[in-house]
Amino acid sequence: MININDIMETINMISEENLDIRTVTMGISLLDCADSDANRACEKIYDKITRLAGNLVKTGEDIESQYGIPIINKRISVTPIAMIAAASKADPVMYAKALQKAADATGVNFIGGYSALVHKGFSAGDEALIRSIPEALSLTDNICSSVNIGSTKAGINMDAVKLMGQIVRRTAEITADRDCIGCAKLVVFCNAVEDNPFMAGAFHGVGEPDSVIHVGVSGPGVVQAALKKYPDADLGQLAEIIKRTAFKITRMGQLVGSEASKRLGVPFGIVDLSLAPTPAVGDSVAHILEEMGLETCGIHGTTAALAMLNDAVKKGGVMASSYVGGLSGAFIPVSEDAGMIAAAKSGDLELSKLEAMTAVCSVGLDMIAIPGETPAEVISAIIADEAAIGMVNSKTTAVRVIPAIGKKAGETLEFGGLLGSGPIMNVNSVKSPKKFIDRAGRIPAPLQSLKN
């Protein structure tokens, strides 16, 4: 039963500790929009999105006003467009423009799903869509793209890995006049999930309903504030504190998701409890790790602290809702986290340490600016390493790196807003992985894939 103390505690979390609903995301299936006539398919896509999501933004604003809970983003995820574009031989960029038109009409922040799933190979439409990504992201403002290149069950498609290194670099080059913003809207996955509400990796999986509401909650500041109250607690006690805090945060997400579902007449999907930081003061995952006892994020002990944080967040979330999903855990994007930015600038946090941390966190190498001269094959190798961590550990991993064209390590790349600014991190490009990447083919699935 809710009492006055619970209400006051939630109000304080919102007003003082940066608690918010990071996103209400409507997933929409476009499978029934496929058509051999691409123009007709694009019309169907626009009509379906605007029909189902026409009131999404207003509904979010109404809930925000009624309950006093900040809802930062209203977003849409759609069926991977490569599946829809396969029905025609038209330029896939047509579909990106149709999605942008729908984004403009509905007023959402982003539409995710300009995507392809190629973890075991390319099917019709996949390669054409992937090669169109740089142009599509340069011509649109609110469209996000993702490509799944590996999984625990399938292994790693190294042909796709090689291609994505080239695509990431080309996307940076074609949007270099806008601080390479295209790469901030492009993520490469291993073990991508079908119900992720967070961008840039959201897409609507084929196992999902025709339409559904997912909610992404974020509260790094709340967790940090809770830990501050117990400076002498041991690590077991800290884990309990994090679990209880995650429970409270998830309950708020469950409330908002259920209310949005009811008002929009769309089934409720999942709550994604991911500690997604922002550049704002007091909203940093790195600062949580430092509150746990690390002098700065990135030093020895960081991976262990992050593993405990991620596990406690998940345990607290699953007690609060029967439908916790998405990625749920702790994100460690560099440019979006004030503590990560400071640690990277001081030299305490390096790319190799970030890679180790991704073995125990929610996703992977996220929003990391790298030198503009980084070769495509090195980007591919970074993707391959991260995919291997995900494949072997049966978890989702991802790479969202931004080659800062014309800039070198130590300089800064500015995005603004939630994307923040990123110190350009050093990448070891002295010796090349080119021969390994050029072998292509497929890295076989690991032994742990044989679970039947």
Image (cartoon, rainbow, N blue to C red):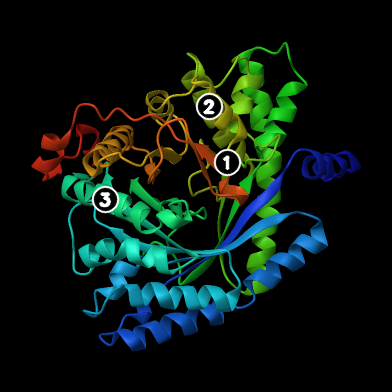
Q: Is residue 181 above or below residue 370?
A: below
Q: From the viewer's perspective, is the residue at label 3 or at label 2 nearer?
A: 2
Could one spot residue 433 in this view of the protein?
Answer: yes
Residue holding disc 2: 345
Q: Amino acid at mark 3?
A: Met
Q: Amino acid at mark 1?
A: Val
**Dot 1 lies on which element?**
helix
Q: How far across and down, in percent of the image, does residue 91 sit? A: 27, 76
Q: Give the residue at x 50% y 70%.
A: 211
Q: From the viewer's perspective, is the residue at label 2 or at label 1 nearer?
A: 2
Q: Are marks 2 and 1 in contact (CB under 8 Å)?
A: no
Residue holding disc 3: 164
Q: Give the residue at x 61% y 34%.
A: 338
Q: Is residue 294 left or right of residue 390?
A: right
Looking at the picture, tell me which residue is in the foreground, 70 or 175. Answer: 175
Decide which of tag 2 and tag 1 comes sooner along the chain.
Answer: 1
Q: Which mark is residue 276?
A: none
Could one spot residue 363 in this view of the protein?
Answer: no
Q: How far across and down, in percent of the image, does residue 414 sit? A: 54, 45
Q: Which mark is residue 318?
A: 1
Q: Is residue 93 left or right of residue 100?
A: left
Q: From the viewer's perspective, is the residue at label 3 or at label 1 nearer?
A: 3
Q: How far across and down, in percent of the image, does residue 311 sit? A: 52, 30
Decide which of tag 3 and tag 2 comes sooner along the chain.
Answer: 3
Q: Give the residue at x 10% y 36%.
A: 435
**Dot 2 lies on which element?**
helix
CA separation in Å, label 3 and label 1:
35 Å
Q: Is residue 352 above or below residue 385?
A: above
Q: Amino acid at mark 2?
A: Lys
Looking at the picture, tell me which residue is in the foreground, 295 or 240. Answer: 295
**Dot 3 lies on which element?**
helix
